Amino acid sequence: MSTPLLKAKNLSVRFGGVKAVNDVSFEVERGEVFTLIGPNGAGKTTVFNLISRIYTPTAGEIEFDGHALSKHAPHEIAKLGIARTFQNIELFEHATVLQNLLIGRHTHRQTNLWSEIFFTAGTRRAEVQAREKVEQVIDLLDLQHYRESMVAGLPYGVRKVVELARALCTEPKLLLLDEPSSGLNVEETDDMAFWIQDIRAELGITVLMVEHDMTLVSKVSDRVLAMNQGEVLALGTPGEVQSHPGVIEAYLGSTEDVASLRRQLA
């Protein structure tokens, strides 16, 4: 049996007197789609920020592909093989889609200042290779029509896909998706589910996702971890977790509230 790609061991983090994450542990297997769910303030994005090294855990450790992430600076995380999208899109709006995607190739840059100034044969080869990789991602996500478009003029749903494409251009082993369906309509969310499935099946990339849309979660997730108030509530398949009493209560209130809601809907 292969070792997990990502291991979170007894993670905790405090902000002043507030414990945003409290003794959270989980493992993400290679090649799976693993999703974190929970109400607002549950600590899901904080876990993402710990993996990205934006935050440092107060206690516990994260291990990625045999590396203790605490030993690496935030700017080294992409080179280790971790890429991320954000709930609020982070793109260069006054650059084209192609230019944004080429930025994603920066982690694979092997040229230096002088070779680029004199545009050596090695630099030319590197640029051709980068363009080839970017074009493969453009084809995968059907972005051909937008290749030369300025990001600022694109619809929100397309910009979501562009941010996903830029993350893929880093050739990650682990892709962190922070609420990929946020702001999307039903059709765009269905497309996002299709992309996630293709990313896993065709590129062999492991996906760790934070998501509120339970339809999307059920479609693409192998396993789900439910959190509430910084702690683990349940871990299992999407069906197992959604039917867990603690998860239902975290989303809908006490069992009495749930019973009352059911009576109102009957």
Image: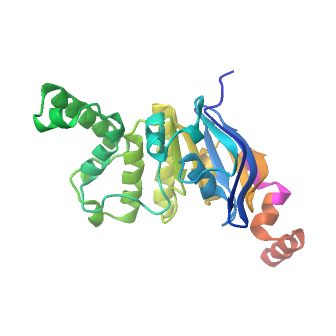
Residue ID at (41%, 57%): 160
Q: Quadrant of the N terminus?
A: top right
Q: Quadrant of residue 137?
A: top left
Judged by its main secondary structure, the magenta piece is helix
Q: Residue at x 39, y 53 (%)?
A: 163
Query: Residue 106's x, y, as percent?
Result: 32, 41
Q: What residue lies at 28% left-to-right and 31% top-to-bottom?
A: 110
Left or right for 97, reference 44:
left
Task: Pick out the residue farthest to the top.
Answer: 1
Horizontal placement of 108 versus 255: left or right? left
Span shown in magenta: 239-246
Q: Residue at x 18, y 26 (%)?
A: 122
In the rendered image of this protein, does residue 220 appear above or below residue 120?
below
Asked if residue 241 lies in the magenta stretch, the reply is yes
Who is closer to the viewer here, 192 or 251?
251
Q: Position of residue 235 (x, y in %)?
A: 76, 46
Quarter of the rendering occupied by the C terminus: bottom right
Report whether residue 105 is seen. no
- Is residue 121 within the magenta segment? no
Counting from the top left corner in percent of width and height, residue 25 is at 74, 44
